[in-house]
Image (spheres, grey):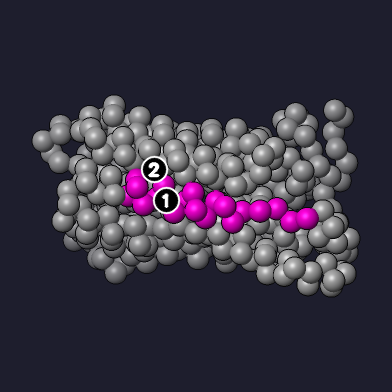
Amino acid sequence: MNQEVFSKSGLKNRGWIVAIAGLGINLALGVLYTWSVFSKAIPKEWGWSETDRSLPYAVAVLLFSLMMVPGGRLQDRLGPRVAATVGGLLVGLGFILASLTTLPLGWTIGFGVLVGSGIGFAYSAPIPAAVRWFPARQTGMISGIVVSGFGLAALYAAPLAQFCISQLGISSTVLLFGIAYLALIVVLAQLLILPPAEYVAALAAEKTTSASGLPSVAVDFSPGQVLRTPAFYMMWFMYACGAGAGLMIISKLATIGAKQAGIELGFLLVASLAIGNGIGRVVTGTISDFLGRRATLLGCFIFQAILILLLASVQQGSPLAHTAVLSVLSALIGANFGANLALFPAAAKDYFGMKHFGVNYGMLFTAYGAGGFLLSLAAGRVFDLYQSFAPAYFLTIALLVLGAVFTWLLPAPKREPVPA
């Protein structure tokens, strides 16, 4: 590669600035994964059922995924700074609105609709902005680094939320979070810039091989072409299974600790899951650059099914019902969940190219929302009916096994586009 392109105006380091800014934005957006702390803190006098406590989170996850499509289109057309700024404004306003009400409907609109939509717009920007600065052989690693912030967020946000709620109450805490996240995301959004054309051309000239074993320069599929490929629908189903399983556990982890295992320090389990979630994204993304996306996903699906089976066996008084044991189990579940958020964007680039990445990955990301929405609500409903999460666990295990089967059936990336 032409080293002058790298050295000119510090462009080589600029890519890392964009990646770190994206990491910072995701550290703010990942407050979504602390919902179980907020849910558990909702006062009994508000009169919410367990289903009510699931609804704002489930709607947020769904809107997060759906807004990735218009967010991706906005990112593709006007750039990542605009998309991330819009997202930051929506996230902040959603938290502020939720802080002003005690009704499930108000929280569903504030946290569910506005925060969820804002996360979708803001999340659509950092990955395509960052990966454009790096060669194809580093796609998995860079995707993992950028999205690791989303997973790691609960590491600080869960204990911070727990502390603020104990000192200020839940409504004041939500208001404080809204103001802080609005400012942080909007400021970091201004650092998301795209590389100049000559820099991109120099990267494209590199003779590298992708994790699929095929030439790394992929064909650029339009959104319409993507929707006519069998690989898209297979990947969508796999993503729904893998992400939905993790999101179900995340939404109820503090409750699982308290009501299933008799552990009141639920925020420690949330923080443990966050560590695994963040680290898992970087590790699995990097591994997939060498072993391939499909092989890495297969291992994650199988391992996650085993972990949830272990979680299903936890009962008060059992050897697994210990804070240290459940913390390790939570971290491993988080790592396997986080792998989805690193591997599927990398796979989307492998299969469909970079030109329309924002929209194409946004369409694929709707699987995240569908899986999370359905399984999170199912977990709450099942608990209301049976006072147990067991049926939801076994449904999730079955879906993970199906996801593993689909990794074997997924075809290799095509090198030629389908007809327009």
At x 20% / y 33%, what residue is drawn? 102
**Distance in Å between CA atoms under marks 2 and 1:** 8 Å
Q: Secondary structure at mark 2?
A: helix
At x 85% / y 71%, what residue is drawn? 4
* Residue 192, x across and y down, in percent: 61, 54
Foreground residue among 231 and 133: 133
At x 72% / y 49%, what residue is drawn? 349
Q: Which secondary structure type mostly characterizes the magenta part of the structure?
A: helix
Q: Residues within 10 Å of mark 1 (few under 14, many from 20)?
A: some
Residue 77 is left or right of residue 389, and the answer is right
Please provide the residue range marked out in magenta: 177-196
On whether residue 319 falls in the magenta region, the answer is: no
Three-letter amino acid code of the residue under disc 2: Gly
* Residue 117, x across and y down, in percent: 47, 35
The reply to whether discs 2 and 1 touch (Cβ–Cβ < 8 Å) is yes
Query: Vertically, is 37 above or below 121?
Result: below
Question: In the displayed image of the protein, which residue is found farthest to the left?
Answer: 45
Quadrant in the picture for the C terminus = top right
- Judging by the rendered image, the residue that carries numbered circle 2 is 92
Q: Can see residue 403?
A: no
* Residue 214, x across and y down, in percent: 84, 56
Q: Give the total number of marks visible in the rendering.
A: 2
Quadrant in the picture for the N terminus = bottom right
Three-letter amino acid code of the residue under disc 1: Ala
Sooner in the amino-acid sequence: mark 2 or mark 1 = 2
Residue 123 is left or right of residue 265, and the answer is right
